[in-house]
Image (cartoon, rainbow, N blue to C red):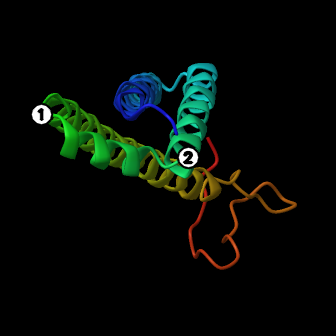
C-alpha cells in the first residue's frame, strides 16, 4: 500500500502547477499572445493529466484515510480545497475571456463582411447595390 501522507503533497503540487498554468493562460489571453496561449494550454493539459492519474490512483481515498489518522492532514486538505477553488475561478475567467474574444471576432467578421466596394454602372454613374438599396457615391 502506498504511503497516505504522500498523496496530499503530490495532489497539491499538481494543483499548483495547474493554477500557475491557468494564470499564465489568463495573461496570454489578455495580451492576445497566441504562442503563450498555446504554451500555457500545453502546461495546463500536462497538469490535468497528472491530476487525472493521481485521482485514478486513489489519491482522494488515501487523503481521507490519512485525514482520519492524523490532524496534520487537515491543513493539507484545506490547502487542496483552496487551490481547487482558485483553479476553478481562474478557469471560469479564462472561459469568459475566450467567449468575449469569440464574440468580438464575430462582430468584426460581420462588420468587414458588410464592407464592399462601391459599384458603378458601365457609364460610370453610381448604381443601386443589389439587395442593399444603397447608392454608392463616386469620389
Image coordinates for residue 69, horizontal then vertical, percent: 21, 40
Within 10 Å of disc 2 (Cα), the crowding (few <14, some 14-19, many 20+) is: few
Residue at the image position 45 percent from the left and 30 percent from the top: 29
80 vs 127, nearest the viewer: 80
Q: Is residue 24 left or right of residue 128?
A: left
Q: Quadrant of the C terminus?
A: top right
The residue pinned by badge 1 equals: 71
Q: Is residue 51 left or right of residue 69?
A: right
Vertical side of 109 occupied by 97: above or below: above
Residue at the spot 56% in from the left edge and 51% down from the top edge: 56
Residue under pointer 2? 57
Q: Position of residue 127 (x, y in %)?
A: 70, 67
**Is 16 situated above or below 134?**
above
Residue 116 at x, y percent in the picture: 68, 54
**Left or right: 94 in relation to 123:** left
Foreground of the two, 16 or 23: 16
Q: Residue 48 location in percent, x, y?
A: 54, 39
Could you tell me which secondary element the residue under label 1 belongs to? loop
Return the residue nearer the eye: 67 or 77.
67
- Residue lying at the far right in this picture: please name it: 122
Residue 53 lies in quadrant: top right
Which residue sits at x=24%, y=43%? 85
Secondary structure beneath dot 2 equals loop
Residue 78 to residue 56: above or below: above
Residue 72 vs 84, above or below: the answer is above
Query: Gap in Å between the C-alphas at discs 1 and 2?
Result: 23 Å
Amino acid at each position: 500500500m502506498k504511503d497516505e501522507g504522500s498523496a496530499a503533497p503530490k495532489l497539491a503540487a499538481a494543483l499548483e502547477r495547474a493554477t500557475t498554468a491557468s494564470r499564465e493562460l489568463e495573461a496570454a489571453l489578455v495580451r492576445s499572445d497566441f504562442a503563450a496561449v498555446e504554451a500555457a494550454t500545453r502546461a495546463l493539459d500536462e497538469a490535468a493529466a497528472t491530476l487525472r492519474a493521481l485521482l485514478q490512483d486513489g489519491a482522494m481515498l488515501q487523503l481521507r484515510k490519512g485525514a482520519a489518522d492524523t490532524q496534520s492532514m487537515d491543513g493539507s486538505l484545506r490547502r487542496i480545497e483552496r487551490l481547487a477553488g482558485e483553479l476553478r475561478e481562474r478557469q471560469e475567467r479564462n472561459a469568459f475571456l475566450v467567449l468575449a474574444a469569440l464574440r468580438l471576432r464575430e462582430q468584426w467578421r460581420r462588420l468587414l463582411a458588410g464592407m464592399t466596394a462601391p459599384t458603378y454602372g458601365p457609364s460610370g454613374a453610381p448604381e443601386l447595390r443589389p439587395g442593399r438599396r444603397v447608392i454608392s457615391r463616386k469620389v
